[in-house]
Image: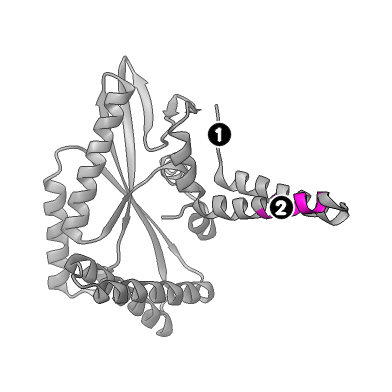
């Protein structure tokens, strides 16, 4: 088993930077000029890997022969599916994150009915089995307010940039406007004394094939179809997961995070 954890690699780079910094302090002459840049490179690498390792590691490992084995399951170098062989048939599962920007508590009964109909129509057009999972928890109000204000500012910036384009995308404008409205509504509820709820929503689809490549290709095709169907029907953002985020969703099939902090820090979706 070959295990690559972005956070572990980040900590290793951070430790290397600390050692290089110490060597710079105690070295004299030309050695100090050598260890100084090395320390800077290590510190920069630790920051990049910690923040973007979930994307960078699958990108680089797909060009190698690194395969992870977890019990009877296999993760290929691209780290975008989970594989298993059963009786000569290969099964491949792909995971997707669904970012919901609206809450039914903010909708009228008619709007809830229409939203549910859109979701049912989207699912009825899918010809394969789909598993949707949602995890809910109560957020820490003090930390959550600051996080919401930051996300609202980021959403407002994305909305402003899209509006300033010569030919703005109508669907993106609607999505960004609803995202800003969602953050505004959550801030209003917090101000009114309501406890904010956090949610992580993801989907899973599985395909079969006579080989690993065939099963993987079929699973990716289903994931792309599901992404297009759900995002178009609900006008929401759907992301096909890879690397650590995908592996976390797979782990959640057995054990979910025991605390809100564990859930919030376990994935980047």
Q: Residue lying farthest front?
A: 30
**Which residues make up the magenta segment?**
31-40
**104 on left or right of 72:** left
Q: Is residue 64 magenta?
A: no
Is 75 situated above or below 48? Answer: above
Q: Give the mark toward the camera: 2 or 1.
A: 2
Q: Is residue 129 visible?
A: yes
Percent coordinates x, y for residue 215 in the rendering: 28, 27
Quote the CA–CA distance across marks 2 and 1: 26 Å
Q: Which quadrant of the view contains residue 232?
A: bottom left
Q: Mark 1: few, some, or many residues within 10 Å (few <14, many ≥20)? A: few
Predominant secondary structure, magenta span: helix
Residue toward you, 121 or 75: 75
Residue underneath mark 1: 3
Residue 256 is marked as none
Q: Residue at x 37, y 46 (%)?
A: 241
Residue toward you, 266 or 155: 155
Q: Secondary structure at mark 1?
A: loop
Is 144 situated above or below 43? Answer: below
Percent coordinates x, y for residue 240 in the rendering: 32, 46
Percent coordinates x, y for residue 163 in the rendering: 25, 76
Q: Mark 2: few, some, or many residues within 10 Å (few <14, many ≥20)? A: many
Which badge, 2 or 1, comes first in the chain's sequence?
1
Is 227 situated above or below 116? Answer: above
Q: Residue at x 22, y 56 (%)?
A: 231
Residue underneath mark 2: 39
Q: How many marks?
A: 2
Percent coordinates x, y for residue 122 in the rendering: 14, 52
């Amino acid at each position: 088993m070959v295990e690559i954890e972005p956070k572990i690699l980040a900590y290793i780079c951070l430790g290397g930077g600390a050692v290089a910094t110490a060597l710079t302090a105690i070295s004299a002459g030309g050695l100090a000029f050598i260890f100084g840049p090395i320390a800077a490179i290590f510190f920069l690498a630790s920051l990049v890997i910690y923040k973007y390792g979930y994307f960078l590691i699958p990108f680089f490992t797909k060009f190698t022969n690194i395969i992870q084995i977890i019990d009877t399951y296999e993760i290929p170098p691209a780290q975008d599916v989970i594989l298993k062989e059963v009786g000569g048939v290969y099964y491949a599962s792909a995971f997707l994150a669904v970012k919901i920007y609206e809450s039914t508590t903010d909708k009228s009964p008619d709007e809830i009915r229409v939203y549910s109909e859109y979701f049912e129509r989207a699912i009825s057009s899918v010809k394969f089995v789909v598993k949707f999972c949602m995890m809910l928890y109560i957020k820490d109000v003090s930390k959550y307010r600051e996080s919401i204000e930051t996300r609202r500012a980021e959403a407002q910036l994305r909305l402003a940039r899209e509006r300033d384009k010569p030919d703005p995308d109508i669907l993106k404008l609607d999505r960004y406007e609803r995202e800003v409205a969602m953050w505004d509504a959550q801030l209003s509820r917090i101000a009114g004394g309501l406890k904010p709820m956090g949610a992580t929503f993801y989907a899973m689809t599985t395909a079969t094939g006579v080989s690993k490549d065939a099963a993987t290709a079929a699973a990716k095709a289903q994931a792309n179809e599901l992404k297009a169907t759900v995002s178009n029907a609900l006008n929401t953002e759907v992301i096909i997961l890879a690397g650590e985020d995908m592996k976390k969703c797979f782990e959640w099939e057995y054990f979910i995070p025991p605390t809100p902090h564990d859930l919030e820090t376990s994935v980047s979706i």
